[in-house]
Image (spheres, rainbow, N blue to C red):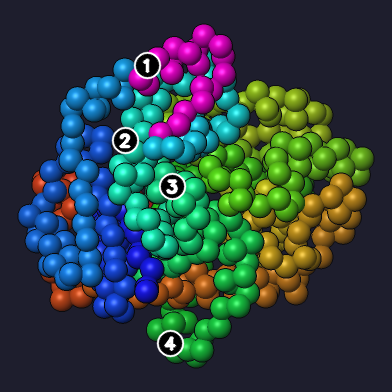
Amino acid sequence: MKPTYILNLNSNSKVWAFAMEMAHRKSEAGYPVLLLDTSNVPFITFFSLSRRRFQKHITKTGQVLVIKKHYSAIEYFKEVMFAYCKFRQGKRFGTFPRITGGGVELTSIIQARISAYLGVREYDFSEVPWRVFRKHFATARICSNFFSRNYPKTDSIVVAYNGREVMSAVLLQQAFNHGFTTFIGERGSDSGKFQLFENSPHYHPNWWELISKYELFESEDDHISHRIHQYEKSKLAGFDTYFSDIWNPSKDLIEADGLDIKGYVLFLSSSSTEYSPFDKFNSDLGFKDQFEAVELLASQCYKQNEMLVIRRHPKSVGIDGLDREARFWKKISSLKNVIYIKPAENYSSYKLVEDARVVFVWKSSMGYESMLMHKPTYALGTSKWGWDPQVQCWTDSRISECVRNPRVEIATNNIVKKFSQFMATSGTNFQLFSSVEKWGVVTQSGDKIFNLFLERVRRKSYDFVLKVTNGERKRNA
């Protein structure tokens, strides 16, 4: 008897498209598919008619079963009241309250999502806003109870998209408790591809295996070569085509300044909130904490009479604009041999790299760009591009050696080649869609399916902003 594939449907167009794709593929291969639809959690969401029609067309086969969680104002009100009791408990005792639902532990899942909002991994519960706690609490509890009631008793395979968002993480937590096999999906090298991971997409040793084993047989093809070149060019303009993400503000590339000195050691920090709520999806390799790593780096620079420039990640502040990591950087920034650049300060990361003698990062993808700029670069943690031992800098003695005599030319050439190929061309093509975006999808036949009612207005606004921003990048790259 074939196992059942369990997938989650929610209001996000990427999650929906991925679930439709997997349901189509697996049902065609003869597997039973269970789609757990939580699109209306925690609030009612109004989807476009084209999305509804397409979903009905894909799920009409007898191999696909859809179970929808219908919105209940009474259930939501009860969860909000329970959330308020837990919130008051956390405020009273100054610790994050223990949260369960559907027979599983949900505390770490909610902690991780609030961490992403606050912009810091370690925080006091007194800093948690009520509306953020309420939102994630209600979503996690309602979904967990729903999944628990509807998970099949037979052996199943759970495929979750991304693995860090609340619904996805709860889906995985229930799967772990049932002993089911799990996979995590993420978008591939372009908007028409996806990638499956056995571990979290943020478990970087998993990336190392995928990238180091990746073979590009069409490397002589002009179209493929152009895509690789375009990926590298876009990265140096602050845009990551793999994640379709503008990671660096255009002003940081165009208007920002450099320093008046050269030949320094440069450290580019990472956002400390990029981690999985599940311990088994977080690597134990390298320095677990970038603050410990940079302290050792600063100490070695002091001993060797080197100036250390620390450039904080531009997005390492909370969504509310507060810099809660500042207290961790206070001690290091006060050292005489350290120049400390805050997240909002108007300095160009690329200009800083150009004038540096050697570059260190913890897990930042900026290390790849610094390699493209032909700078000796080392990873103090498990960066996606850091699979080669020559660029891994995980001990105090190794830091000392790399500051004194940075030599990674051969490793750099190999990493840049393989990383560029993988990020520009890897992944599995969607059979149903030629493009999957935030606003909706384009099918293989060219039809546009908008995610929500009135999505056209949002999409046009988004496309206009993207066009203007990318126009500036191309002119100044």
Q: Which residues are magenta?
A: 82-101
Instruction: Look at label 3 and name its amino acid.
Output: Gln
**Neighbour class for label 1 at 10 Å: few (<14), some, many (≥20)?**
some
How far apart are the alpha carbons under marks 2 and 1? 15 Å
Q: Nearer the viewer, residue 339 or 88?
A: 88
Of callouts 2 and 1, which one flags the residue occurring earlier in the amino acid sequence? Answer: 1
How far apart are the alpha carbons under marks 2 and 3? 13 Å
Q: Position of residue 470 (x, y in %)?
A: 35, 56
How far apart are the alpha carbons under marks 4 and 3? 46 Å
Asked if residue 187 lies in the magenta stretch, the reply is no
Quadrant of residue 152 in the image? Answer: bottom left
Which mark is drawn over residue 142?
2
Residue at point 64% right, 56% down? Answer: 383
Element type at marker 2? helix
The residue wearing badge 4 is 222
How far apart are the alpha carbons under marks 2 and 4? 51 Å
**Neighbour class for label 3 at 10 Å: few (<14), some, many (≥20)?**
many
Residue at point 53% right, 42% down? Answer: 277
Q: Position of residue 459 (x, y in %)?
A: 20, 51
Q: Position of residue 406 (x, y in %)?
A: 82, 60
The residue wearing badge 1 is 84
